[in-house]
Image (cartoon, coloured by chain):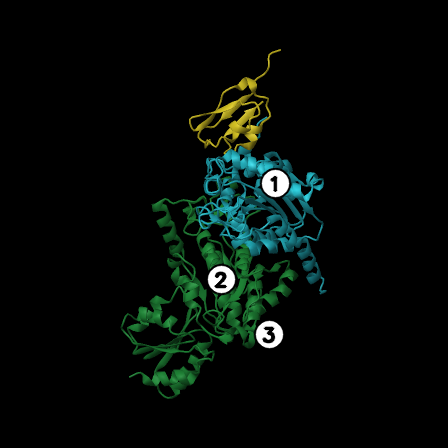
Chain colours: A green, B yellow, C cyan
């Protein structure tokens, strides 16, 4: 049977990906350039018995998403830079209380109101470090409409599996461009659900690690009574300031992601086998990079692309391995060097990292990348 | 017929000594003994339950 | 018979954190009696709070409890209620949490008329942080951040709720302990967003700065200023000067949010718009 295909925007595809993943609750606040997600889901969610709510502000949307997730739903919010800034406190809440949810953030120019309709890739550090305190982060960077769908499904899976908020972060170009998309059949893509407790309600502890670093999560209203707080807490969910315990808990909440980093980090290696120059790119910029790599190859330059699909956790191991083999990295990005810092960290001085930074609301074009390749001696 | 006296249990580790029970008892059954409330005159208790009702600390249980 | 509060409390959590004479414990007891009166199942009751002294209440209650971030209780609770409309959802918190940082969520929960009950303990101050003035601190009052007297006018929480669209609004006081459970019982029974403001005392950070000599003096002030709505009808404006109305101040039947959304689902599934 032929697959169902459509010609969609990245944002629309993401909304359909959420439905595929079993998302049944969306809370949002209108913000350019992410609003299409809310528009599609306001139409589609009630058809499948799901709920859509437009909240009074960005913070409320994040709060409702966490509340809905505790009620047992798979939940999503969509936003963009200023909204991402506003949501940060409650993103931290979802981290410490270990509530699965997905934040779809379309990257526009910033800081502040910046360029609401202009593309950027400048929210990657905001996703990583925007909320205060130590915490693990998972953030995915789609580069196509198909990936907006697939990475949203993947984000729900990761959120459910590791009990934390997960980001999907297309830049505005990817969020708004239209492409052909093939919808996977039901069952074709893996869909994960959170681990539910098997112990009887009176024995349940929401942060009981006897089953591993990701404790089972009960839902409110399912017969289990438990306490959830944003304070540092004991396995039973009640606040504590016991030094040893707090330290161990903070470390566990990072370990639950980082110990499984090889299963989380996703990337694409394009013509890397003999590459002397590696372009490290993501999102729409990787599309320019791919074009530039193909052009350069025609001119006999040995160049390839490492495309970042999971920016957090960062693909440290992969970049470190490349650093020992290549002459240089080229890092085109629509910000002033956020990803470049990470590549430099992983390169450990073994290879120079040549950045191409653009924050004028225009995409980085293949010519710019090609020119940079020619600078490499 | 002998009057059946109630029991007024004061959980000392909950009592924070706010004086509310002592003050709002209409028949002055309770008093402060040091920092906690105590029964002074059980005979006078009219079982109105005001002390139990008003105690902010869940420290008083009256069994009429 | 002594009321069995223990049935609704988590074992081993008392004594609570509230100061001597703080009325929050009185309000919590009223809430427990209301839950008992209505026979609510603990596992089907969510109690959601923000941050502050009053917001520590859920930790003591043997229910589904959610201690959220400062001001955000109503927004978190909206998510819980949407996901689990069959649950009874109670919100608790103080005046600073609810009307300053949480003011926006408060008025919008009122506007939506979502079936939840908000018990707001108004002690006119930020207690937990040490007595800074709140939107409910009376003009002229002393707080740690109004050393020369408060220049700000105060919110009337009940009027704010009514203006924003809450369909059940009541007010009681920590002095009128036996009225608290009755107001909360009616509020929970009401279909829609209900607000119960309980005028409360903070002896530690408000009383001592504002010339109250004791907890008892603060309690007696609550007794003196409260006028039941019925009694107020027979009083002149002069007589009502400095008084506060108590009882059920407003009640209206209006479509409830979750029911309205159920109709959205029906329309969507019927293909109509």
Q: Nearer the viewer, residue A82 or C231?
A: C231
- Callouts 2 and 3 on one subunit: yes
Q: Quadrant of residue A316?
A: bottom left
Q: Residue at x 49, y 54 (%)?
A: A99
Q: Quadrant of residue C107?
A: bottom right
Of labels 3 and 1, the one closer to you = 1
Residue found at the far top of this picture: B1
| Dots 2, 1 in contact, CB < 8 A | no
Of labels 2 and 1, the one closer to you = 1
**Residue A275 seen in the figure:** no
Q: Nearer the viewer, residue C200 or A55?
A: C200
For the C terminus of chain C, the image quarter is bottom right
Left or right: where does residue A193 sit relative to residue A353? right
Task: Decide: is C62 above or below A193.
Answer: above
Q: Nearer the viewer, residue A141 or C239?
A: C239
Q: Residues within 10 Å of mark 3 (few under 14, many from 20)?
A: few
Q: Position of residue B60 (x, y in %)?
A: 52, 28
Q: Position of residue A252 (x, y in %)?
A: 38, 52
Left or right: where does residue C65 sit relative to residue A135? right
In terms of secondary structure, where does tag 2 sit? helix
Q: Residues within 10 Å of mark 1 (few under 14, many from 20)?
A: many
Q: Which residue is the site of mark 2?
A: A86
Mark pair 2, 1: CA separation: 35 Å
Left or right: where does residue C270 sit relative to residue A56? right
Q: Position of residue B48 (x, y in %)?
A: 60, 25
Q: Which residue is the site of mark 1?
A: C172
Q: Which residue is the site of mark 3?
A: A6
Residue found at the far bottom of this picture: A299
In terms of secondary structure, where does tag 1 sit? strand
**Residue A288 seen in the figure:** yes
């Amino acid at each position: 049977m032929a697959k169902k295909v459509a010609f969609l925007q990245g944002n629309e595809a993401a909304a359909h990906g959420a439905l595929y993943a079993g998302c049944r609750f969306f809370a949002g606040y209108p913000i350019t350039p992410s609003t299409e997600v809310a528009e599609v889901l306001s139409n589609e969610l009630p058809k499948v018995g799901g709920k859509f709510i437009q909240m009074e502000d960005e913070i409320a949307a994040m709060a409702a998403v966490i509340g809905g997730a505790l009620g047992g739903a798979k939940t999503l919010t969509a936003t963009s830079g200023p909204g991402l800034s506003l949501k940060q406190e409650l993103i931290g809440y979802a981290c410490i209380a270990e509530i699965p949810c997905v934040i779809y953030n379309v990257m526009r120019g910033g800081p502040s109101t910046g360029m609401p309709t202009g593309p950027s890739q400048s929210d990657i550090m905001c996703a990583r470090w925007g909320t205060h305190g130590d915490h693990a982060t998972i953030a995915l960077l789609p580069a196509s409409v198909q990936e907006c769908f697939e990475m949203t499904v993947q984000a729900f899976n990761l959120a459910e599996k590791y009990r934390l908020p997960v980001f999907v972060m297309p830049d505005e170009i990817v969020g708004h461009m239209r492409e052909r998309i093939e919808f996977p059949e039901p069952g074709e893509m893996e869909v994960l659900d959170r681990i539910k407790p098997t112990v009887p309600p009176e024995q349940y502890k929401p942060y009981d690690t006897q089953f591993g670093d990701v404790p089972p999560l009960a839902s409110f209203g399912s017969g289990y009574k438990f306490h959830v707080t944003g304070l540092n807490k004991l396995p039973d969910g009640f606040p504590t300031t016991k030094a040893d315990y707090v330290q161990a808990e903070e470390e566990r909440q990072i370990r639950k992601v980082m110990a499984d980093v090889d299963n989380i980090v996703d990337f694409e290696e394009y013509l890397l086998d003999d590459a002397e120059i590696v372009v490290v790119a993501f999102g729409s910029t990787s599309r320019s990079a791919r074009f530039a790599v193909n052009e350069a190859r025609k001119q006999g330059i040995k160049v390839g692309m490492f495309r970042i699909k999971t920016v957090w956790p960062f693909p440290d191991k992969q970049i470190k391995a490349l650093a020992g083999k290549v002459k240089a990295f080229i890092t085109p990005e629509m910000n002033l060097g956020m990803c470049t810092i990470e590549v430099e960290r992983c390169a450990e001085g073994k290879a120079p990292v040549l950045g191409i930074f653009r924050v004028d609301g225009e995409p980085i074009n293949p010519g710019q990348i090609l020119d940079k390749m020619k600078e490499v001696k | 017929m002998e009057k059946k006296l109630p029991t007024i249990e004061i959980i000392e580790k909950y009592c924070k000594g706010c004086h509310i029970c002592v003050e709002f008892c209409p028949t002055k059954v309770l008093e402060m003994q040091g920092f906690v409330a105590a029964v002074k005159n059980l005979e006078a208790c009219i079982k109105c339950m005001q002390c139990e009702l008003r105690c902010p600390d869940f420290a008083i249980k009256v069994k009429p | 018979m002594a009321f069995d509060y223990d049935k609704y409390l988590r074992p081993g959590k008392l004594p609570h954190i509230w100061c001597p004479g703080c009325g929050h414990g009185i309000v919590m007891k009223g809430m427990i009696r209301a839950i008992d009166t209505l026979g609510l199942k603990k596992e089907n009751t969510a109690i959601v709070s923000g941050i502050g002294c009053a917001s520590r209440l859920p930790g003591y209650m043997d229910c589904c409890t959610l201690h959220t971030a400062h001001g955000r209780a109503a927004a978190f609770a909206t998510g819980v209620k949407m996901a689990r409309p069959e649950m009874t959802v109670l919100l608790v918190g103080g005046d600073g949490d609810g009307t300053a940082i949480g003011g926006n969520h408060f008025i919008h929960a009122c506007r939506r008329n979502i079936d939840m009950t908000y018990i707001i303990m108004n002690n006119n101050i930020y207690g937990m942080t040490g007595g800074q003035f709140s939107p409910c601190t009376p003009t002229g009052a002393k707080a740690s951040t109004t050393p020369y007297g408060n220049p700000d006018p105060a919110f009337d929480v009940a009027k704010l709720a009514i203006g924003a669209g809450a369909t059940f609004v009541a007010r009681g006081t920590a002095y009128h302990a036996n009225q608290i459970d009755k107001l909360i019982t009616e509020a929970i029974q009401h279909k829609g967003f209900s607000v119960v403001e309980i005028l409360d005392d903070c002896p530690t950070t408000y009383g001592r700065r504002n010339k109250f000599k004791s907890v008892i003096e603060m309690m007696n002030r609550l007794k003196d200023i409260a006028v039941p709505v019925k009694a107020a009808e027979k009083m002149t404006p002069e007589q009502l000067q400095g008084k506060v109305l108590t009882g059920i101040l407003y009640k209206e039947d209006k479509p409830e949010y979750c029911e309205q959304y159920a109709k959205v689902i029906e329309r969507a599934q019927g293909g109509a718009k």
